[in-house]
Amino acid sequence: MGTTTGPRSKHVRRNASAMRMVGALLAVFRTAAGYTQSSLADAFALGEETIASIEQGRRRLKPDLAEQLDDFLGTKGALTAALKHLPEVDLVPQWAEEYLEREREAIAISWYENQVLPGLLQTDAYAEAVFRSRVPVYDEDEIARLVAGRVKRREILEGNEAPFTSFVVWEPAVRAPLGGKEVHAEQVRHLRACSELPSLMLQILPLNRTSHAGLAGPFVMLETPEHQRVAYTETQRGSQLIADQDEVAILNQKYAMLRSQALTPEDTRDLLDRLLGEQ
């Protein structure tokens, strides 16, 4: 999340050429079975653009959908097998890539953070400080690559089609001077500017609250273009993408409570202004 590895600066996806091959296979199987992109999408309650993106290699075919398509099109496991044996060619771990892909496509993002600031809200210098804090340490080339990926992710918040984003951040993460005084001051100014974006809601959970719904750690919830909800969590040595709707519902309840415990967006801006006045 705040520390998730980012994709390469040119946004090269894992197995890009192989994914185009899988997409081409799907197009062949679909046509042979007599379906258009639109009719196949309707059969799975998906958007036509979703099928088109998979066939063009712009969107990764996920294993569960591959199995369903194999059954529906009578392809005897061909798509599942092709997906299973794709070569490992990218530097981004598979779990990270799947999250980052869903993050790029999300129509809504809800993010709670209590350790570092959310990756989508980090400045270049703050992101570098985060990656330099890693133990064992990254080398300079790796730091540069990761920072470039983090900067690229910020594009999600820009433009007319930006998703609705809601962030709740525990106050210690806002006050922690990672990178030093100047880096911290720039980061707080950036948070203040982000708080004015029309599709972004930023709330700080203050230290003086006597109850706290997020003590188990940070998490992110995403809403897909098909209005499905998934969640993502990180630990010291692993990460998890959660699709089970019962588990997602629990995190949704936690997030609702965190928002009620946090400062309002207006009071959050006032706190950021006070922090800037203290610089």
Image (spheres, rainbow, N blue to C red):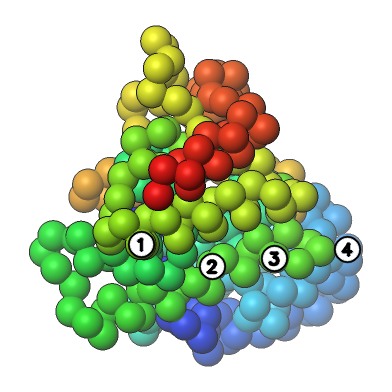
The answer to whether the residue labelled 3 contacts the one labelled 1, judged by CB atoms less than 8 Å apart, is no
Residue behind mark 4: 39
Q: Earlier in the sequence, mark 4 or mark 2?
A: 4
Q: Secondary structure at mark 1?
A: helix
Spatial CA distance of label 2 from label 1 is: 23 Å
Spatial CA distance of label 2 from label 3 is: 10 Å
Neighbor class of circle 4 (other Cα within 10 Å; few <14, some 14-19, many 20+) is some
Residue behind mark 1: 182
The picture places residue 15, in percent across and down from the top left corner, at 46, 82
Which tag is nearer the camera, tag 3 or tag 1? 1
Q: Earlier in the sequence, mark 1 or mark 4?
A: 4
Neighbor class of circle 1 (other Cα within 10 Å; few <14, some 14-19, many 20+) is some
Say what amino acid the circle numbered 1 marks: Glu
Tell me if residue 102 comes above or below residue 85 in the rendering.
above
Residue behind mark 2: 153
Q: Secondary structure at mark 2?
A: helix
Residue behind mark 3: 158
